[in-house]
Image (cartoon, rainbow, N blue to C red):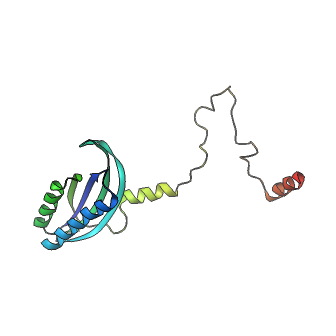
Amino acid sequence: MPLYECVLIARNDVTQQQVEAIAEQMATILGEQGGELRKREYWGLRGLAYRIKKNRKGHYMLLGISAPPTAMQEVERQLGLNEDVLRSLTIRVDAIEEGPSAILAKRSDDRDRFRGPRPAGRFASGRGGRERSDDREEFRARSREEIEQTAGTEE
């Protein structure tokens, strides 16, 4: 049976549960037509590149589908009739990837990245011609002995 990936964008004023309900409707249609929904990923509320029907954001959903072409025609027809769906794109693929898509993998990489102080850029602070360095005491790494010594002098 042919394999397809379908990405749909729902309006931003619907909830995530309503977007999941749209995916369930598509799964029901596929089941009736002899196909199946193999993968479902909710990508979240994301900004659109341009306004679509007065919306600046939309809920993105990826569906991995195994179905005959007639079933896919019905799914695309139903997505076009649904007022909550702004856009949908269906493509035929050779294989449905197991595991997270590139969008979800990128999102998890962004969350794992360290967000420390920014390194000095091309220009210094720009104030008074002085450069600020990270040699200040609050930025300098101190050894345990230095910490114990300062704790002993403060008491």
**Residue 26 quadrant:** bottom left
Q: Residue at x 22, y 54 (%)?
A: 88
Question: Is residue 109 visible in the rendered structure shown here?
Answer: yes
Q: Is residue 19 left or right of residue 153?
A: left
* Image location of residue 81, percent across then percent down: 15, 55
Residue plotted at (43% across, 56% down): 107
Q: Which of the pair 121/138 is nearer the observer? A: 138
Q: Where is residue 89 shown, x and y percent of the image?
A: 22, 54
Image coordinates for residue 134, horizontal then vertical, percent = 70, 42
- From this viewpoint, is residue 34 visible? no
* Residue nearest the viewer, comparing 85 with 62: 85
Q: Is residue 117 above or below residue 43?
A: above
Image quarter of the N terminus? bottom left
Quarter of image, res 146: bottom right
Which residue is at a point 88% across and 56% down the rendered structure image? Answer: 152
Q: Position of residue 82 (x, y in %)?
A: 18, 56
Quarter placement of the C terminus? bottom right
Outermost residue to the top: 128
Q: Is residue 21 above or below residue 130?
A: below
- Drawn side of residue 133 relative to residue 92, left or right: right
Q: How many marks?
A: 0
| Residue at left offset 76%, top offset 45% | 137
In-image side of 2 versus 141 (left or right): left
